[in-house]
Amino acid sequence: MCIVCTVVSVVSVAILVGIWTFQFLKPAKTPVALWDRYRLPDTLLPEAYYITLWPRLKPDHRGIYIFTGNSSVVFKCVKDIDLILIHSNKLNLTSAGGHMARLTTLNNIPEPAIKSTWFKVPTQYLVIELQSKLKAGESYRLNTEFVGELADDLAGFYRSEYIQDGVNKVVATSQMHPTHARKTFPCFDEPAMKAVFHITVLHERGTVALSNGQEIGQQWQKAVSEGHCAYALNLTGPILNFFENYYNVPYPLSKSDQIGLPDFYFGAMENWGLVTYREANLFYDPAISSNGNKEQTATIIAHELAHMVITDSLPLLIFIQLN
C-alpha cells in the first residue's frame, strides 16, 4: 500500500514539475506596438485645435465633391515619448518637408525632428516617429494640411442634398459621433481627449455656415417662413428652463441652434450648441402632421437638449451606447 502511495506521489510531483517547467519555458508574448492598439496611449493630451475647412459644393472635373483644410493642434506631453499617434481616416495629407505633418514647440526648447510619418490603416492612426523624445510637461503644436471627399456617406464631414423650387441644393454637414471626427481632420478622436476648438469655415457668398459656439441666428428660410419650425422654437426655451431647474445646472452655452437635415443617419445628434436632426424629427406642420409626430418631435428635442445641460459635459473615457 505504501509503495503504491509513493509511486502516486512521485507521479504527482512529476506532473506538477512538468506544468511549472512548461509555464516558465513557454515563449513570452511579444508586446503590442502602440499603433496596433485601438485606444490612444496616455502620453499626450490635446489643449486646443485651430481648424479651417473649405467644402466645395460643386463637383470637380472628376465629378467628385471634396473639401480641403488645415489643422493645428496644441497638445501637452504627459510622459516622455518619441512617438505621436493621432487619428486620421480617409484623408490625403499634404507633405511638408518630406513628412505628412510639421511639429513645433511653444516654449524655448528645440522640438524633436520627425524621423518618419505613415498611416496605420486598421487602427486609423497617422503615426509620427521622432528622432528624440517629447518632454513631459511641455506643449507642442502639430500642423497638417489635407484633402478629403465630401461624400454622401452620412459620416464625418459629408454631403447632403435636397430640392428647393425645383433646384438641387447641396449641404456640407457633419456626423462626428462616435469615431468620425478623424474623417474630417487629424485629431485625438476619443471623448476623454477634450479640447477647445477654433473653427473657420470658408463658404461662398449666399450660403450660411453654422458651428457649435458662434452666435448665429440663421436657419433654413423656407422651413421658417412656412411655419415648420415654430413648434420646435416654442418648445426649446421651456425645455431648457425645466432642465436647468431640475438638475440645478445652468445652460453652459451662449446659444442653442437646431437644424434639420435631409440626409442624416441618426434621428438626431446632440452636437454642443448645434443640434442636428432628421427633418421629420424637427419640423412640424399642424396642417398635415399627426399627434404622434407632434409627440415624437417634443420627445426628441427634449432628449437632445438634456445632453446640452448634462451629458455633453461628462468626462467620458470612451464612447458607449447612450440612450
Image (cartoon, grey):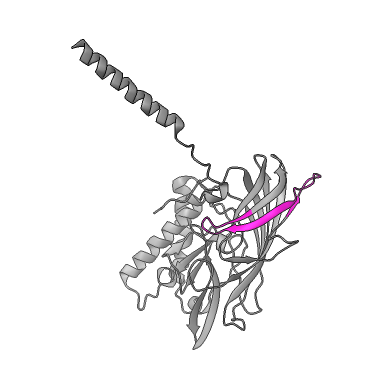
The residue furthest bottom is 166
* Nearer to the camera, 214 or 134: 134
The residue furthest right is 108
* Nearer to the camera, 107 or 90: 90
* Residue 223 part of the magenta-drawn span: no
* Nearer to the camera, 47 or 114: 114
Query: Can residue 53 be seen?
Result: no
The residue furthest top is 2
Quadrant of image for the C terminus: bottom left
Which stretch appears magenta? 103-127
Relative to 260, say whether 310 is above or below. above
Relative to 65, say whether 132 is above or below. above
Q: Quadrant of residue 86?
A: bottom right
Relative to 154, say whether 11 is above or below. above
Quadrant of image for the N terminus: top left
Q: Position of residue 170 (x, y in %)?
A: 54, 79
Question: Relative to residue 208, is residue 243 drawn left or right?
Answer: left
Query: Can residue 115 be seen?
Result: yes
- Residue drawn 48% across the image and 57% down it: 178
- Residue drawn 51% across the image and 42% down it: 30
Q: Position of residue 83 (x, y in %)?
A: 65, 47
- Residue drawn 59% across the image and 53% down it: 188
* Nearer to the camera, 54 or 121: 121
Q: Position of residue 261 (x, y in %)?
A: 48, 72
